[in-house]
Image (cartoon, rainbow, N blue to C red):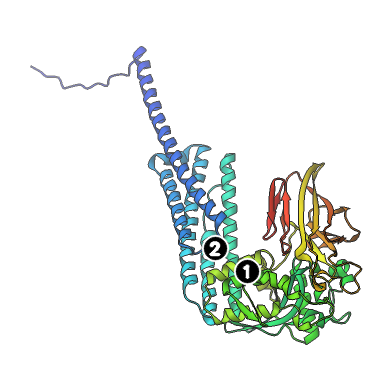
Amino acid sequence: MTTSPDVHTTEPPPTGAPARRWRRRLVVAVLGLVVLWVGAVSLTALAAYDHARRGLDQLQALRANLSPDQVSAPGTRRALDAARAQFDAAHADLTEPWMVPLVAVPVAGRQYRAVRDLSAAASTVAATGSSFVVGAHAVLQAPHGAGPERVAALRELAALSGRAASRLDAIDVGPSAGLVAPLAAKHNEFVSQLTDAERRLSHAASVSAATAAILQGPRTYLVLASNNAEMRAGSGAFLEVGTATTSGGHLHLGPMQPAGSLTLPAGAVPVPAELARNWGWLHPGQDWRNLGVTPQFDVTARMAADMWQADTGQRVDGVLSLDVVGLKQLLGATGPVTAAGVTVDSSSVEQYLLHDQYVGLADSATGDTGRRDRLGALASAVLHQLEGQSTDLTTLAKAMAGATEGRHLLVWSADPATEAAWTGAGVAGTITPSTVAVAVVNRGGNKLDPYLDTSVTVTTRPVSGGTTVTLRVHLDNTTPPGQSPYIAGPYPGVDAVAGEYVGLVTVNVPGRARPPTLVSGGPLVTEGPEGPTWLVVSQVDVLPGATNDTVVTFTVPGRHGSMTVLPSARVPPEQWTVGARRVDDTKPETVSW
C-alpha cells in the first residue's frame, strides 16, 4: 500500500459575511487598543499636568515672597526641592513607554515634546536654585569680620551666581513654534522668567565682584549725604559732601562738609547741554544743593565728580549717595550708634534727622552751622560700627536691598564695567525709555517735605492710534503750626509765609510717548527731552492746610502698554492709584493698561 505524503494547505481567508465579521473584529480590536492607549496617555498626561502645576505653584509662591533675607533660608531650599520633585514626577510621567509614540503623531507630537522638554527644564531650574541656595547659605552664615574676609565672601558669592547663571543659560526649553495657544503662552512665560532669572544672577555676580574689587581697593568715592526733608528729583538735597576710601576690604568715611560752603564760580565745571537747557537757571554746576534736579543720577554723579575735582583737585573713582531712609536701613543691621552726642537707632533716626535736629534753629541761612545736618556724622558712625563688628551678611543684604530699591542708596562708577554692574543691579539711579516719574522739588529752602503728602492718579483712555494717559498729581500740605523757622521757613529772600511750600512739580514720561501737555497747575517752567524720557515742569505753591493739583497728559502708541514708576525717595512715599490698584513708590512698580 502506497502512502501519499502529507499535503499542508493554507486555509483561504473567509469570504462574504465571514470576512466582514473578521474585519470588524480586527477593527474593534485595533480601536480597543487605541482607546486603551489614548486612555493611558490621557491619564498620564493629567497626572503630569497636576505635578507640573503643583511645581509651578510652589515656584510662583516662592518668587512672590522671596526677600533678600530668605534667599539662603532652609525653607527656600525645601520649597525648591519640593518643586523639583514635582517637575521630575511630571517628566517621568511624560517619558513612560506608552507616551513615546506621541512623538510621531503630527501636531500632537510637537505639543508633547514641548511639554516634556519644559518639565525637564523646570526641574533643572529648581535644582539650580536649590544648589545656589545651599552655597549662598554656607557663605552668608559663616562668621565674617571686616576686611579680607568680607572680600572673600563677596567673591565666593560672585562665583556662585556666575555658575548658576551659566547653568540656566544652557537649558534647552524645547520647541517654541507651532504650539497651541495655551501651551505657547506658558512656554513664553517660562522662557521670560528663565531669562529674567539668568539676568538677575548675572547681575548679582557682577555686583558682588565689583563690590569686592572696590573694597579691596584702593578706591576713593565721593559721598553725597542727602536729606529727605528737602527734596529734589529722585533724591533729597545733597547737604553734605565728603570722601570714602577703601583698602584691603576696609572702608573709611572722612569728614563731611556742608554743601553750601563749596559753591563754585560760574563756568568752573562744564554743564551737559541737555542739563543746561532744562535746569541751567538753577546753576547745577555751581551749587551742590541743586545737583539733584534731574532723576538721572548717572548725570548728577558725573557732575559731582567734576565739581569735587574742580574744588579740591582730587579725582574720585565713583560717587555714592545716601539719604535718611538708607541710613535707617543700615541701622537695622548695625544697631544703635552715637555721634555728636546723639544716639539713634532704626526706629528713631528718621524723626531726628527729618525734624528734631532742626528744632530751635532760626532758619537755613543763619544759625549754628555746627548743628546743621548730622546725617554725615551718623553715617560715619554707622560705617565705623560695620567695620568694628562681625555683621550678619544676610541682614546687611536685606538692608542694602531696601535702601537701593527706593533710591535711598545710589552708586555711580567712573569705570564703565563697574557702572554697567550698578546699572544692571538697579542701584545706578538711571532712567529708561519706559520710566514715568513724578517729583516735587523744594525751592523754599525749608524742611517741609515730610509734611507734603503726594499722590498720583493714573487714568487711560483709548484714542485713534494709541492711548492717552493722564497723571493727576495731588499735593496736600499738612504742616502743623508751631514749627521752627528752620523747618517751616520762610527762607530769607523767598516770598512766602511760614509753612508755605514753594517748589516745582516735575513729571517724566516714557520716551515713546508724544511730548506731554501740562493741562492744569502752576506756570510752565520747562519742557522737552530729558535722557530717554520727556520732561514737563511747573511751579507749585501750597499754603499750610491747602491742596494743589497738577494734571499732565500724554499719548502712547497702541491700545495696551506699560510703564515703570521710578521711586521718588520721598518720606512719606508717593501713593499711586491705577484703577483699583494702589501702591506706594518705595520700589519700582509696573503700570499696565
* N-term-proximal mark, 1 vs 2: 2
The residue furthest bottom is: 313
Number of disc labels: 2
Foreground label between 1 and 2? 1
Q: Position of residue 514 (x, y in %)?
A: 83, 52
Q: Looking at the picture, which amino acid does disc 1 mark?
A: Ser
Most foreground residue, 542 or 394: 542
Most foreground residue, 330 or 134: 330
Task: Kindly state the secondary structure of the residue where label 1 is placed.
Answer: loop
Q: Is residue 112 left or right of residue 273?
A: left
Q: How many C-alpha atoms fall within 10 Å of the one at disc 2: few (<14), some, or many (≥20)?
A: many
Q: Find residue 347 and name its label.
A: 1
Q: Position of residue 459 (x, y in %)?
A: 77, 47
Q: Looking at the picture, which amino acid does disc 2 mark?
A: Ala
Q: How many C-alpha atoms fall within 10 Å of the one at disc 1: few (<14), some, or many (≥20)?
A: few
Q: Position of residue 524 (x, y in %)?
A: 90, 59
Q: Is residue 266 left or right of residue 456?
A: right
Position of 47 relative to 30 (above/below):
below
Q: Find residue 464 and name its label.
A: none
The residue at which mark 2 appears reads as 165
